[in-house]
Amino acid sequence: MEDRIAQLGTDARARIAAAADLEALRCIERDLLGKQGPLAEILASIPSLDKAERPAVGRLANVLKCELLAVAAERREVLEAELLAAERSCEDFDPTLPARPARRGSLHPITRVRRRVEDVFTSMGYRILEGPQVELDYYNFQALNIPADHPAREMQDTFYCTGSGNLVMRTHTSPVQVRTMESVEPPYRVISLGRVFRKEEQDATHDHTFHQVEGLVVGEDVTAGHLIGTLRSLLAHLFGRELDTRLRPGYFPFVEPGFELDVRCPFCEGGCRVCGRTSWIEFCGLGMVHPRVFAASGVDSERYTGFAFGFGLDRLTMMLLGIDDVRHFMAGDLRFLEQF
Ligand code: FA5
């Protein structure tokens, strides 16, 4: 066995010294030192050798392994230096050429607008909270006054998690309302931003995965006037000027009264593609927290009132950055993303 190791060493040194380029050297290293190589085979056979022979064979094989690694590293340095020298001596090598520009990443457009929205709300004293994307049916629906047999469940096509019975991919950020009310003593102002999911047909304004911003304010004497003022102020900050808004009655089981806030289209006078030729763009669902939601969350509705609102971050980003299709956001196409 000792002769075999010595012979293996002689052959291996000769092969490494003769390696013509880096690729050849890589192959030789793999052959000699890889898991299927002769050295690995010798080391694996040690338990089957005579007891007296084992220590010497083990030592020789390991010494040879270390030596071959060092010889190969030396040869690699020589080959790399030769390669560099060859590149430099070639006719069209021009050391004065500027380096290739480093490719810089950029923030996703949704992240940009998300941060602007967060800045406006934090400047108004809101805290930012997170909620789980895989949510209990209880928080996504039941505690929001949408029991299992309620027709309002059809307003939001839901991905139910198979095998769990009571887990859903959250269809909106409103579950964070209940989680907040359960765990924090009023008064508070919070927003929560994040991904939501709906089993929808995709088109230019609908995706199965999109982003919402939820707002919740609970305290004594909180009114719908505060709610409308807050949203108008948000829009003025984001668009850099006062926008015309209108309030319509809207049905959401977790608020009473409930409204929808529309914004006069900032891109046209009298109708364009973005507003569907109506001059108005639906911006937000909103309303006063329903007493049943307060009850489910353990908040005293005799003492406190509250408002909540929820809007789509994707559609807001489309408006702010002039993007015409919501499906661009999740497509991961660099040609789109590199524009921001
Ligand atoms: C809700 O999700 C309510 N939770 C909002 C709410 C919160 C009302 C608090 C009252 C109080 P709605 O289903 O309308 O409401 O969705 C809100 C926004 O999400 C829409 O205005 C729209 O901007 C966005 N949205 C809805 N579906 C999609 C979709 N498939 N793709 C992209 N954006 C969507």
Image (cartoon, helix red, strand yellow):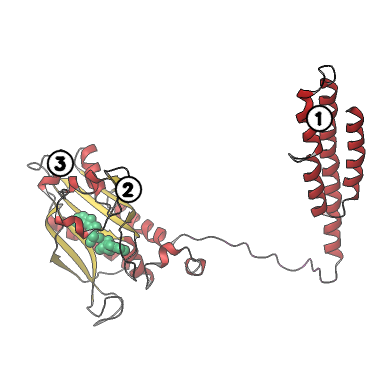
Image quarter in which the N terminus is found: top right
The answer to whether mark 1 and mark 3 are in CB contact below 8 A is: no
The three-letter code of the residue at mark 3 reads Ala
Callout in the foreground (3, 2): 2
Q: From this viewpoint, is residue 65 visible?
A: yes
Residue 66 found in image quarter: top right
Marks 1 and 3, the one that precedes in the sequence: 1
Q: Kindly identify which residue carries mark 2.
A: 161
In three-dimensional space, the C-alpha distance between marks 1 and 2, rounded to whole angstroms, equals: 54 Å
Q: Position of residue 275 (x, y in %)?
A: 27, 76
Question: For residue 320: magenta?
Answer: no
Q: Position of residue 36 (x, y in %)?
A: 75, 40
Residue at screen point 26% across, 58% down: 157
Secondary structure found at label 3: helix
In the displayed structure image, the side of residue 273 where residue 12 appears, left or right: right
Classed neighbour count for the residue bearing mark 3: other residues with Cα under 10 Å, few (<14), some (14–19), many (≥20) = some
Question: For residue 92: magenta?
Answer: yes
In three-dimensional space, the C-alpha distance between marks 3 and 2, rounded to whole angstroms, equals: 24 Å
Q: Kindly identify which residue carries mark 3.
A: 296
Residue at screen point 24% across, 46% down: 137
Q: Which is nearer the eye, 117 or 289?
A: 289
Q: Position of residue 302 (x, y in %)?
A: 7, 42
In the displayed structure image, the side of residue 250 where residue 310 appears, left or right: right
Label placed on residue 62: 1
User: Which residues lie in the magenta part?
Assistant: 91-107
Up the image or down, 77 lies above or below 39; here it is below
The answer to whether mark 1 and mark 2 are in CB contact below 8 A is: no
